[in-house]
Image: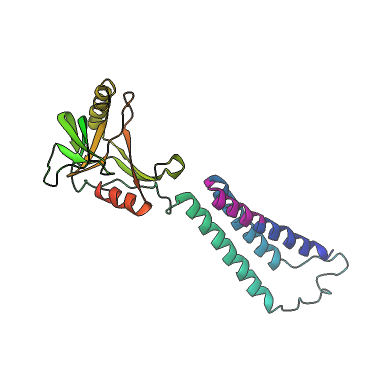
Amino acid sequence: MAQSGSSEVAVWRAVVLGGAAGTAIGLIGKIPVLGLVAGLVSVIGVVGLLIAQRTPARSAHLTASDRPAPEASPGRPARRWVWVVAAVVVAAAAALLLVRPWQDDQSAEPQAAREPLGFYLVQGITPGACAPNATAPQYTTTDGSGCLTVSAEGGFTVRQLDEVQVQDQSDQGNGWAVSVTFADQDTARFTDLTRRASALPEPRNQLAIVLGTRVLSNPTVLEPLTGATAVITTQLDQAGARTLAGELGAR
């Protein structure tokens, strides 16, 4: 039947549209596997569609010699290119979904931090900001409400981190945060320092995280932290968190 060719074309068009819809759902829902598979389905659909459009419809009543030559359709090549372009766009979207370069928590291997990142035990806190000429071991808290005195004993500094990530923790009330992952030798020191801090009374159970001459955060440590990652929550906005990540070596 002459309609079989058009039916086949319609099926392949449906495959292409279904693949495009699946890629869109994957992008919106941030589901990489769905987006990638749907993108491949869309590409396969376009290939099948082009083949179906190039294959003349079969007729049960005409012989090869009697069959009239197909009329040229000036719009058909243009329509084919539209479907090809659509498949390329869908495939590119699927690839972007898999790579996800826009993600804020994405990171490459960081460079050395611009200034030493220090982790110290807090010895005490006095109300109000530190004196203008105060130097280490005194640091004004990020909100300016207190002056921390820290102990260098048992503390440590790092210049090279394994990973630096920017994270949106607005849903937790922390704004944008920066997480750092230590190298193996620094992970053990971080675990030991948090173990010591968790055993001390308030406010000495706080851990001062210092970058250069300023304190970034002074979280309370309730139990030893055995992982290699520490999250620095500083109530920063997105731009401020990215700037901090850059100071810590993020590219």
Q: Is residue 84 above or below residue 170?
A: below
Q: Residue at x 68, y 74 (%)?
A: 76
Q: How are the residues colored?
A: rainbow
The image position of residue 154, as x and y in percent, is 17, 27
Q: Residue at x 84, y 69 (%)?
A: 63
Q: Quadrant of the N terminus?
A: bottom right
Q: Which residue, as the protein is rendered here, is positioned at the far right?
A: 61
Q: Quadrant of residue 170?
A: top left
Please check the rendered image and state whether residue 94 is part of the magenta-colored stretch, yes or no. no
Q: Is residue 34 above or below residue 58?
A: above
The image position of residue 237, as x and y in percent, is 37, 51
Q: Nearer the viewer, residue 54 or 61?
A: 54
Q: Is residue 186 left or right of residue 76?
A: left
Q: Nearer the viewer, residue 3 or 186?
A: 186
Where are the magenta residues, as a range?
18-32
Q: Which residue, as the protein is rendered here, is positioned at the far top?
A: 199
Main secondary structure found in the magenta portion: helix
